[in-house]
Image (spheres, rainbow, N blue to C red):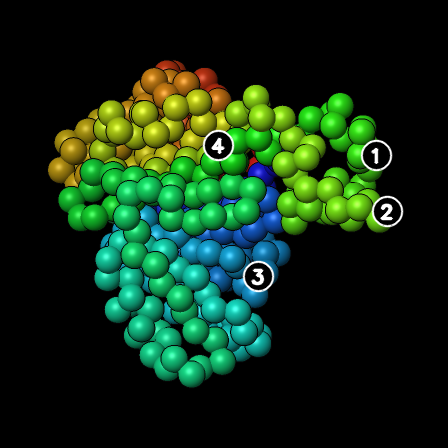
Amino acid sequence: MKARIVFLGTSSGVPTAERNHPSVFVEFGGRRLLFDCGEGTQRQMMRAGLSLYKTDAVFLSHLHADHWLGIGGLYATAKFFGRREPLLVLGPRGIRDICGFFAPNKKSRLTIKTHDLRTGVAYDGGTFIVRAFPLEHGIPCYGFVLEEKCGTRLDKTKLRRYGLLNNPLCRELKEKGRVRVGTKTVTMAQVSSSKASGFKLCYITDSRPTARITKECAGADVLVCESTFAEDRMREARDYGHMTAREAATLAGKARAKRLFLVHFSPRYKDPGVLEKEARAIFPQARAARDLMEVKV
Ligand SMILES: [Zn+2]
Ligand SMILES: [Zn+2]
């Protein structure tokens, strides 16, 4: 299955003229997810042509305001547009109070459903799960691993058996997990290989590098990782619980990730190219994400 990733905000702390507060949109298995939701996220979604209406879940890494201030706007606009399905927001303990402020009325047309994160599976997306695990940032903070469920990679021989090889219906199958072919319903399990390991995407911010992160991100197809500072600001990185570009690249290398996208740049760097260059010296596939940059993997 393919993932669509849109980097909505790549700044840290305060936004800049070029960069918004943190947020990454991921579409996978027919679900639309947001990882962090900094101030201005809804406007970035509009600029990227993404529907506010259809967000399935919002994952908040931690409760530093720049990572969640966008929830209020996202909620208000989705409500204005007539969304009825509750907005699901997952975050560390305390998220209920924040969301309760924005959506205090349980009888409102649109409610916010909150879920306190703990280590382990936080969300089941049908064909994939999202796991949460603790990061090292001074306050409770979680990293996320989106993992395609084992056995959901399509098998060509099985697809042919059900008349689905090169069939446009495959798109529906990937999105919904099942599809009607003639008079029969074919499920994902019937046409997937159990041997193949599934797609894996990790979202890591904010944190110092840890052995746990390396372990959790092992073999990731995509690692989205904070890279707040360049190496000359190592002391700040240590003091404030962040990573340098070099540390993010080292982590990606140790975890044997396939691709690394750097995010969460300090406003002191007008052009994050300097961080990309530093990371590439260690991990050549590193790329500094830009606001509204879209990748399909
Ligand atoms: Zn941050
Ligand atoms: Zn933070």
In the rendered image, which residue does mark 1 sit on? 163
Q: Are marks 1 and 2 in contact (CB under 8 Å)?
A: yes
Q: Earlier in the sequence, mark 1 or mark 2?
A: 1
Q: Residue shown at 57%/61% (left/top)?
A: 54
Give the residue displayed 13% in from the left and 37% down from the top: 239
Which of discs 1 and 4 lies nearer the camera? The answer is 1
According to the image, label 2 marks what residue?
Answer: 182
Calculate the distance from the C-alpha at mark 2 to the C-alpha at mark 4: 33 Å
Distance Cα–Cα, label 3 vs label 4: 23 Å
Circle 3 SS class: loop
Q: Is mark 4 within 8 Å of ligand 1?
A: no
Q: Between 175 and 222, which is closer to the camera in this rendering?
A: 175
Residue 113 x %, y %: 40, 66
Q: Give whichever of discs 3 and 4 has the lower sequence position.
A: 3
Q: Quick one: label 2, few (<14), some, or many (20+) residues within 10 Å?
A: few
Between disc 3 and disc 1, the foreground one is 1
Which residue is disc 3 drawn over? 54
Q: Amino acid at mark 4?
A: Lys
Q: Position of residue 160 (x, y in %)?
A: 81, 28
Q: Pick whichever of labels 2 and 4 is earlier in the sequence.
A: 2
Q: What whole-number distance in Å separates the C-alpha atoms at marks 1 and 4?
A: 28 Å
Comes first in the chain, label 3 or label 1: 3
Disc 3 to disc 2, C-alpha distance: 30 Å
Q: Which residue is mark 4?
A: 200
Mark 2: secondary structure: loop
Residue at the extreme front of the image, as rendered: 184
Cβ atoms under marks 3 and 4 closer than 8 Å: no
Q: Quadrant of the C terminus?
A: top right
Report the residue that reaches farthest toward the right.
182
* Any part of residue 15 in sight: no
